[in-house]
Amino acid sequence: MFLQINDVSKTFDDKNQGSFEVFSGIDLNIEQNQFVSLLGPSGCGKSTLLSMVAGLESVSDGSIVLEGQEIKKAGTDRGMIFQQASLFPWLNVKENVMFPLKSMGSKKEAEEKADRFLQMVHLSRFKENYTHELSGGMQQRVAIARALAMDPKVLLMDEPFGALDEQTRHILHEELMKIWEETKKTILFVTHSIQEAIKLSDRVIVMGTRPGKIIADFNIDLPRPRRRDDPQVIELEKKVMGLLEVEINKVLKEELSYESHS
Amino acid sequence: MKVILKRVLFLFVVIGIWQLVYSLGVYEKIVFPGPLQVGQALIKGFTTGDFLNALGASFRHLFSGLSLAILFGTILGVILGKSKQADETAGMYLIALQSIPSIVWVPLAIMLFGFSEFAVVFVVVLGGTFVMALNVRSAIHSVPPQLVRAARTMGTNGLSLFFRVEIPSSIPYFMSGLRLAWAFSWRALMAGELLSNGPGLGYSLRYAQDYARMDQVIGIIIIIGVIGAVVDQLVFSKLEKNVMKRWGLLKT
């Protein structure tokens, strides 16, 4: 197996409120070259799980193994893209893409790689610009180029298009599909958008909340590019929506009851 | 251009009022000299080289004092910014020390080092160090955690993270610290020199007062004000603005 998440739990220790369990006993096997989405309402721990795969969060119990190696800390074999592009404002676009390459070979190689991946995200024209001169969508494309330049085994994406407007999001979906077909990276994609998950993924893992858990696991065999008005897509969306509604109602009910008690 | 015109016009109005009060003889001429006398005192002070020597000495004190203040302040600030333990232990005292007006240190400096130039430098160092340290501390705290997380996913850790992410990210706030350290040091310098045995601009000021040369006193006050404004505008504010713009913190 390529990426294994074995019986993983996450507990946050809070000095005031005791410990808080985000999820426990999560089991997942991700195959190589697949595009897998983690879909769920806020609070289900999908982003926490992704951060654990990235090595930014510790694993409370269980293990995460990538190609036979247990993940203990962050490393260049996993590239992460956040909701905010998280580019370095003191570097220009090209220098940003070269940032992770500093310890990975000569400067010339780094420059060639940066040029190649900036071309892949169609930003060659802006390589000398500073990041604050770019739009949100362009910044996110720089972040994608930067992650790809490290040639990671897995690309981890944490609601990468969540802060963008609808049109930009659609353009970036298409670009991401092209990049994925070109590079054949394994992608683990966190989102709360059902449409986004179904449009992009080979496999959608639906998570529930309180406590976080996997409630469904769909393989999506529909041909790409997928159209939103495709009856099969609509059918799937309805099915997932039905599952999530139960979860969202659970959260709502809990929040409302808390409100009436206090 | 229009702004400059307004400012020049304003200056003329102020000088005019000054001349008017002088001509009316509200105060005795020896206590309250007119613009002309002050202008003459300034010209004379510069042509004899007295003011230039004093200025040279002042800048020498400032340069050594401010450099040390920046050095100590940066070291202190980095320690307090990086170590929560240190910050909880000593952070509050730093704010207390920063709030002490630098002239308060002068008696201590004189007792410790006598009426020497070193005593002046000592006061300048104290004047600049604490404000620098506080700003460097905020600079370190201001590093967005998101950038640190992103850097970690790119295999950057420890010292490399500090030098490649935390330092460049905090430079705009570091620049603000620099500007404030200069402003505080400049004030401390004048306080220190005023009570010193010279040489220096502050010393010349007291010397002029001792000999009741009010034209020189006002002339030196003008020099002090002009230098303060010019250095701030042409050096530190400009530097800070350029950095802010470059870091995308200032929209143009």
Image (cartoon, grey):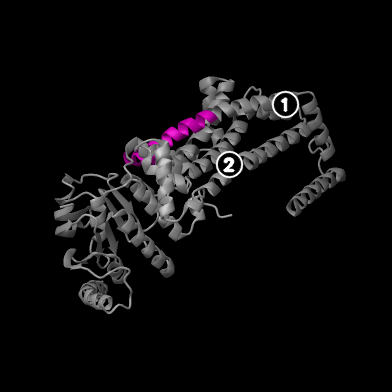
Q: Residue at x 27, y 78 (%)?
A: A234
Provide the residue span drawn in magenta.
B67-92
In-image side of A229 versus A12 (left or right) = right
- Answer with mark 2 or mark 1, whichever residue precedes in sequence: 1
Q: Residues within 10 Å of mark 1 (few under 14, many from 20)?
A: some
Residue A157 position, x and y percent, is 31, 57
From the viewer's side, name the closer residue of A118 and A213.
Answer: A118
Q: Number of numbered discs present?
A: 2
Residue B83 inside the magenta-drawn segment: yes
Q: Residue at x 45, y 60 (%)?
A: A136
Q: Amino acid at mark 2?
A: Leu
Q: Main secondary structure of the magenta part?
A: helix
Q: Does dot 2 land on a helix, a strand or a loop?
A: helix
Q: Residue at x 78, y 27 (%)?
A: B45
Compared with A36, A110 (above or below) is above
Residue bearing the label numbered 2: B239
User: Mark 1 — on which chain does it sit?
Assistant: B
Residue A143 inside the magenta-drawn segment: no
